Image (tube, rainbow, N blue to C red):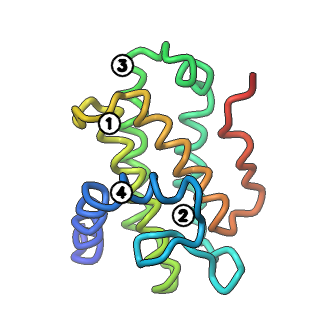
Amino acid sequence: MSYRSSRWLIVAATLALSVAPAYAADHAHEHDAHGTTALKLNNGQKWKTDAPLRQGMANIKAAVQPHLHAIHENRLKAANYQTLAKRTNTQVAFMVENCKLAPDADAQLHLIIAELGAAAEAMAGKDKAQSRQKGALQLVHALEAYGEFFDHPGWNGSATKHEH
């Protein structure tokens, strides 16, 4: 692991523990919140992405989609949450290692990564203050936020929502 990737894993872990819960609460109603911990657009435009970022996020989305109904109905088994947590962590590590974004876009991405990390912790059962289901819902929220703030051709945010 390179110095850059280990440094960003430490930053992402720190953000996941300190920023993600506040971001999730603030972001639910205000997309352009004040401060450096809120996602924002790039002068009204979505942030540019690169192939490793698109691949990693698409893989996370593909892992969660088959389980959306069970997650929303709170009937997904602990082993499935554990698998989702592992897949999320694997893809986050891949993105941190391989993404080459402009500094401002990278800073915004790390807010998403923080939320993904916090979601994985909860889904793995490591966050005793949050249920596995809430972790999975936080993962879905992070995927939706990614689609809202990052330019990923073909990304369909509605595919992460539970349909009744």
Q: Quadrant of the C terminus?
A: top right
Front residue (pair 20, 29): 29
Mark 3 or mark 4, which is nearer to you?
3
**Relative image position of residue 23 (x, y in whole percent):** 43, 59
| Label 4: which secondary element | helix
Whichever of labels 3 and 1 marks the residue nearer the N terminus, that label is 3
Say few, some or many: other residues with alpha carbon within 10 Å of mark 1 (under 14 / 14 to 19 / 20 or more). Answer: many
Mark 3 or mark 1, which is nearer to you?
1
**Relative image position of residue 104 (x, y in whole percent):** 49, 84
**Label 2–label 4 contact, CB within 8 A:** no
Whichever of labels 3 and 4 marks the residue nearer the N terminus, that label is 3
**Three-letter code for the amino acid on which mark 4 is drawn:** Ala
155 displayed left or right of 90: right
**Residue behind mark 2:** 53
Whichever of labels 2 and 4 marks the residue nearer the N terminus, that label is 2
| Label 1: which secondary element | helix
**Residue behind mark 4:** 93
**Residue behind mark 1:** 122
Relative height, residue 149 to residue 158 (above, below) = below
**Label 2–label 3 contact, CB within 8 A:** no
